Image (spheres, rainbow, N blue to C red):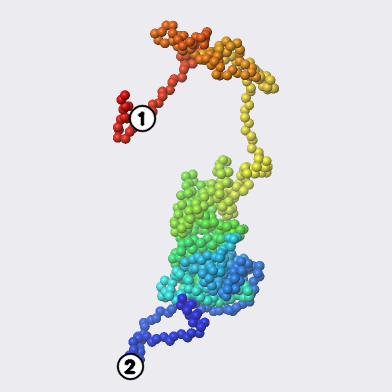
Amino acid sequence: MHAMLKRIRDLLGIPKKPRRPSGKAAPGGDPAPREPAAKEAPRKTPPRVRRGPNVVHNPIPVSDLDPDAVRILQRLAGFDHTAYLVGGCVRDLLLGRKPKDFDIGTSATPRQVKRLFSNSRIIGRRFRLAHVYFQSGKILEVATFRSYDAEDEGEPGGDLLIREDNVFGSPEEDALRRDFTINALFYDPATGNVLDHADGLGDLRRRLIRTIGDPEVRFREDPIRILRAIKFAARLDFDIEEKTRVAIADHRHEIPRAATARVLEEINRFCRGAAARRSFELCRETGVLEVILPEIAGPYGKNAGAWTLLVALLDAMDARQRGGTDIGTGEIFAALLLPLLAGRVGWSESGRAAPPRDLNSRDLVEEILRPIAVRLRISRKDQERCRLIVQTLLRMVPARAVRRAFRQSIVHRPSFADAMWILEAIAGARGGDFAEALEFWRSGREPLPARPEAGPGAAAPEGTEPARKRRRRRRPRRGKRGAEAGPGHESEPRPEVATQPVPPQQQVRGEARAQRGGERPAPGKKMPAPWDDDYFFAALPSAPPLEGEENDSDRYGASEVATGLPSRPEPAASGEDGGRAAPPRRKRRRRSRRRRPGGAPPPAPPAE
């Protein structure tokens, strides 16, 4: 607000009000002399550095610019707002590199940007800006020019950490409050001019990383600038200015004061910019590695062989990134931890792999990974990815110890591809069993079967034997027509088998059929209906006589219906006369009566 009022006064030409003399008036009317202060603390002002040319005409080909960013600049300029391409995109374009993203700086406030672009959203709390979204998923960042906040400057020697940065200012003030000179360059596509406020073009020619102003103050304001200086020096192959390098070593202990998520993001950017090896070498030289990763910095300082293997893994990571494959957080920490675990899992520097039998790889990884994950707040997904990669590698080496039935399961693991590029790096550094395992998993393993989605008519991959069909054993036909079945199925005399007696029920039916004068009808003849009286009643057994009655067997006239039919005999016991024992009857389970509440007995039936 103070800076805005100052700009309004300057535009309208309003003179400043004279300061009132401090102190009480003397008896003669003159103000009392002010007591001299012990020592006034100097107020922090925007840093002033040696400037190069203010405006340099250096047009950049339109094909190298993002057309969406150019349209945003044109729309902002159409509504009388100043807008430039700012930051790293201008630096990369001047160096002939392809920018990762295009950032825009403007004099419009975030709310004004929101009104101009319906596809935008205001984000941020410490640093409020607008994101403009596009259908392709691209996001362009539009930030307002910033200035220093005089109220939050703090005292010299006190806490200078910036917790809020929402004071708007001019383009020059915005350039001078940035971290490094090479990031303080603005570009106007309409005129083709580069605006340089801090001699960033000179540092680009000298290939130098230098802070704007006092490096000690800038690193105390935001300790993440220490990691950014290392990242830019490694990615651009620049040197760090001597004064800036000394300030990095002096103030590296303030890095934990920054947000944990920002520290983890900068560690990932070390490896995702194809400059992982140089970044970690600079961290080790400046002592920053002991601050951001103290759990592994000590062991790497004592074990030279582990550091050599880590350098080989970082080189392979850079080659993988240059090939266009993104590196995940789980892969990064698997590569950082594996050289420290090599000695404990039986991987010697001579290339021999002899893991112990009682090895618990998951607990071994957890012992080192867990403290790092808790401090840096690594997600559970990335932690599990790191464990799976290390466990897969321990299964793959040595290759002669892999069981035949276990090979396919290793190949189909999601972490197999990540483990393969790590195995390639270890094989190139140590050889021996690792080179043998690499050759085995590349070409020596059995070919994979064809995928089921390829279709039943698809040809199998080259070198793959077709799967044998399982043949069912054909049984020879039995019966009278076995001889007519063809060659190979000739009927043979069947051995005699002891026949069992016909049950009485079937005897009754057979005799009833014989009485009707007919045998079993031919296949085309109709069977008698089951409800015919002769057929139905003839199949019924005769009723047994009651006790105490001598000649009451024909009490109900059953003899007229079943004349000449024997009565139903009692089934013989098992083993007697070759008969079968009757199956025992099941007892009917009695339903339990529902118990009434209170244990009251059921009501008695009413008396007649």
Q: Residue furthest front?
A: 608
The reply to whether residue 335 is in sight is no
Q: Is residue 255 above or below residue 476?
A: below
Is the C-beta separation of discs 2 and 1 under 8 Å? no
The residue that appears at 54% across and 53% down in the rendered structure is 349
Q: Amino acid at mark 2?
A: Gly
374 or 115, which is in the foreground? 115
Which of the 4 quarters of the picture holds residue 64? bottom right
Please provide percent x and percent y for residue 339: 51, 55
Secondary structure state at the residue bearing disc 2: loop
> Residue 366, position in %: x, y?
46, 52
Is the residue 562 above or below the residue 425 in the image? above
If you read the primary sequence from the N terminus, does the residue marked by circle 2 or circle 1 appear first? 2
Q: Determine the image quadrant of residue 323.
A: bottom right
> Which is more toward the observer, 401 or 135?
135
Residue 347 spot, x, y in % from top left: 52, 50
- Given residues 282 and 68, the one toward you in this image is 68
Residue that label 1 marks: 593
161 relative to 351 in the view: left or right: left
Residue 607, numbered label: none
For mark 1, give the secondary structure.
Answer: loop
Q: What's the CA distance linking mark 2 and mark 1?
A: 117 Å
Q: Residue at x 49, y 13 (%)?
A: 541
Query: What numbered label is drawn on residue 28?
Result: 2
Q: Residue furthest top?
A: 550
Amino acid carrying label 1: it is Arg
Q: Position of residue 60 (x, y in %)?
A: 64, 71
